[in-house]
Image (cartoon, grey):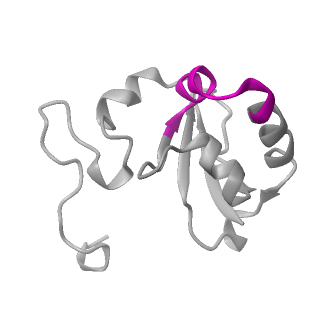
Amino acid sequence: MKNIQVIDGAENCVYDIFQATEEELALIFPPGQDIAFIDEVLAQGNQEKLNAAFSNIWVRRIKKLEAVGIQGLMYYELEKKKAYYPTRRDEEAINPNGSLLRANAPSQERSL
Protein backbone atom coordinates (compact mmCIF):
# COMPACT_ATOMS: atom_id res chain seq x y z
CA MET A 1 0.00 0.00 0.00
CA LYS A 2 1.04 3.59 -0.67
CA ASN A 3 0.24 6.59 1.51
CA ILE A 4 -1.45 9.82 0.40
CA GLN A 5 -1.70 12.82 2.70
CA VAL A 6 -4.72 15.03 2.11
CA ILE A 7 -4.22 18.76 2.59
CA ASP A 8 -7.57 20.53 2.72
CA GLY A 9 -8.37 24.22 2.73
CA ALA A 10 -10.97 23.75 5.47
CA GLU A 11 -10.27 25.52 8.75
CA ASN A 12 -10.66 22.26 10.69
CA CYS A 13 -8.55 20.09 8.37
CA VAL A 14 -6.34 17.58 10.18
CA TYR A 15 -4.24 16.46 7.17
CA ASP A 16 -5.08 12.77 7.35
CA ILE A 17 -3.11 10.03 5.63
CA PHE A 18 -4.89 7.37 3.60
CA GLN A 19 -3.62 4.17 2.03
CA ALA A 20 -4.02 3.43 -1.66
CA THR A 21 -3.14 0.51 -3.86
CA GLU A 22 -0.62 1.00 -6.67
CA GLU A 23 -3.50 1.13 -9.15
CA GLU A 24 -5.42 3.73 -7.12
CA LEU A 25 -2.29 5.83 -6.70
CA ALA A 26 -1.72 5.75 -10.47
CA LEU A 27 -5.24 7.11 -11.08
CA ILE A 28 -4.47 10.16 -8.91
CA PHE A 29 -0.80 10.86 -9.65
CA PRO A 30 0.52 10.81 -13.22
CA PRO A 31 3.95 9.17 -13.65
CA GLY A 32 6.70 11.21 -12.00
CA GLN A 33 4.34 13.35 -9.95
CA ASP A 34 3.66 13.26 -6.21
CA ILE A 35 1.48 16.38 -5.91
CA ALA A 36 -2.16 16.37 -7.00
CA PHE A 37 -4.98 18.90 -6.94
CA ILE A 38 -8.42 17.34 -6.77
CA ASP A 39 -9.88 19.48 -9.56
CA GLU A 40 -7.14 18.33 -11.96
CA VAL A 41 -7.53 14.70 -10.89
CA LEU A 42 -11.27 14.79 -11.53
CA ALA A 43 -10.85 16.62 -14.85
CA GLN A 44 -8.36 14.11 -16.27
CA GLY A 45 -9.56 10.80 -14.93
CA ASN A 46 -12.24 8.24 -15.58
CA GLN A 47 -15.00 9.30 -13.17
CA GLU A 48 -16.25 5.78 -12.57
CA LYS A 49 -12.78 4.45 -11.72
CA LEU A 50 -11.98 7.49 -9.58
CA ASN A 51 -15.22 7.20 -7.62
CA ALA A 52 -14.48 3.55 -6.90
CA ALA A 53 -10.87 4.31 -5.95
CA PHE A 54 -11.81 7.15 -3.60
CA SER A 55 -14.55 5.03 -2.00
CA ASN A 56 -11.85 2.51 -1.12
CA ILE A 57 -9.20 5.03 -0.13
CA TRP A 58 -11.43 7.00 2.26
CA VAL A 59 -11.96 3.93 4.47
CA ARG A 60 -8.21 3.32 4.75
CA ARG A 61 -7.17 6.18 6.99
CA ILE A 62 -4.09 5.38 9.01
CA LYS A 63 -2.61 7.12 12.02
CA LYS A 64 0.33 9.35 11.18
CA LEU A 65 2.53 7.44 13.63
CA GLU A 66 1.83 4.25 11.68
CA ALA A 67 2.62 5.70 8.25
CA VAL A 68 5.85 4.55 6.66
CA GLY A 69 6.45 7.29 4.15
CA ILE A 70 4.12 9.48 2.13
CA GLN A 71 4.05 8.84 -1.58
CA GLY A 72 1.74 11.70 -2.54
CA LEU A 73 0.08 14.90 -1.37
CA MET A 74 -3.41 15.73 -2.57
CA TYR A 75 -4.75 19.26 -2.19
CA TYR A 76 -8.39 20.27 -1.82
CA GLU A 77 -9.62 23.88 -2.08
CA LEU A 78 -6.10 25.28 -2.26
CA GLU A 79 -5.80 26.58 -5.81
CA LYS A 80 -3.21 29.15 -4.66
CA LYS A 81 -0.76 26.31 -3.92
CA LYS A 82 -0.56 25.37 -7.61
CA ALA A 83 1.93 28.17 -8.22
CA TYR A 84 4.39 26.52 -5.82
CA TYR A 85 4.22 23.16 -7.59
CA PRO A 86 4.41 23.83 -11.34
CA THR A 87 5.95 20.39 -12.00
CA ARG A 88 3.62 18.69 -9.47
CA ARG A 89 6.73 17.27 -7.75
CA ASP A 90 7.20 18.08 -4.07
CA GLU A 91 10.99 18.31 -4.17
CA GLU A 92 10.77 20.86 -7.01
CA ALA A 93 8.53 23.32 -5.12
CA ILE A 94 9.35 26.96 -5.91
CA ASN A 95 8.83 30.40 -4.42
CA PRO A 96 6.85 33.06 -6.30
CA ASN A 97 10.14 34.43 -7.69
CA GLY A 98 11.02 31.01 -9.16
CA SER A 99 13.72 30.10 -6.65
CA LEU A 100 13.64 26.69 -5.01
CA LEU A 101 11.47 26.58 -1.91
CA ARG A 102 13.84 24.19 -0.12
CA ALA A 103 17.56 24.44 0.24
CA ASN A 104 19.41 21.54 -1.37
CA ALA A 105 20.94 20.55 1.98
CA PRO A 106 19.88 17.18 3.39
CA SER A 107 17.13 17.53 6.00
CA GLN A 108 19.27 16.10 8.81
CA GLU A 109 21.68 19.03 8.46
CA ARG A 110 19.03 21.62 9.15
CA SER A 111 18.89 23.06 12.63
CA LEU A 112 15.57 23.14 14.41
Image quadrant assignment for residue 12: top right
| 5 shown above or below 66 | above
Q: Is residue 47 left or right of residue 40?
A: right
| 45 shown above or below 19 | above
| 96 shown above or below 74 | above
Q: Is residue 96 magenta?
A: no
Give the residue at x 72% y 72%.
66
| 43 shown above or below 33 | above
> Looking at this rendering, what residue extends furthest in the bottom direction?
108
Measuring from the top left, give residue 45's x and y in whole percent.
63, 29
Give the residue at x 50% y 44%.
30
Q: How many marks?
A: 0
| Type of secondary structure dominating the magenta stretch | helix
Q: Which residues are magenta?
A: 36-49
Give the residue at x 63% y 53%.
4
Measuring from the top left, give residue 57's x and y in whole percent.
79, 48
Measuring from the top left, give residue 20's x and y in whole percent.
72, 55
Image quadrant assignment for residue 38: top right
Name the quarter where the C terminus is drawn. Answer: bottom left
In this view of the protein, which residue sits in the foreground, 68 or 1? 1
Q: Is residue 54 left or right of residue 14?
A: right
Q: Is residue 33 left or right of residue 72?
A: left
Name the quarter where the N terminus is drawn. Answer: bottom right
Measuring from the top left, give residue 105's x and y in whole percent.
19, 71
Q: Is residue 41 magenta?
A: yes
In this view of the protein, which residue sits in the foreground, 20 or 69? 20
